[in-house]
Amino acid sequence: MDFVGFMSSTAGRALRVVVGIILVVLALFGPNWSTALEVILLLLGILFIVVGALNYCLLAPLFGKPIKGGK
């Protein structure tokens, strides 16, 4: 299975949500980094959670596959 195929699968969705949660927790409760880095981590975490929950794979169109997982 290729990377995009994995990321479009249920396991890939779960991985994106988990990574998103980890990024949000790091941004909110992690070490005292610069504010810009914390905002970037928070936005990336929210993005990963949203695309995982909605079953979108943002890399898929780059490889000629549909953006919506499972198609």
Image: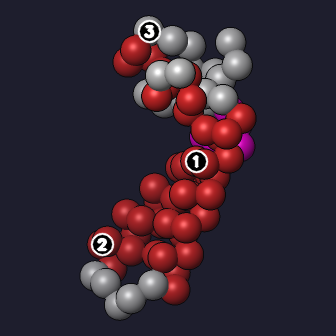
19 is higher (above) or lower (below) than 32? above
Which of the numbered marks, if any, corresponds to residue 16? 1
Amino acid at the residue labelled 1:
Arg
Disc 1 secondary structure class: helix
28 is higher (above) or lower (below) than 1? below
Q: Quadrant of the C terminus?
A: top right
Assess disc 1: are there few (<14), some (14-19) or many (≥20) residues with their C-alpha within 10 Å of its C-alpha.
Answer: many
Mark before the other along the chain sequence, 2 or 3: 2
Tell me the magenta residue range. Answer: 50-55
Amino acid at the residue labelled 3:
Gly
Q: Give yes or no for residue 51 being in the magenta stretch.
A: yes
Looking at the image, which residue is at 58% across and 47% down? 16
**How far across and down, in percent of the image, does residue 3 sit?**
46, 28
Would you say residue 12 is visible in this rendering?
yes
Distance from the alpha carbon under mark 2 to that under mark 3: 34 Å
Residue named by callout 2? 36
Disc 3 secondary structure class: loop
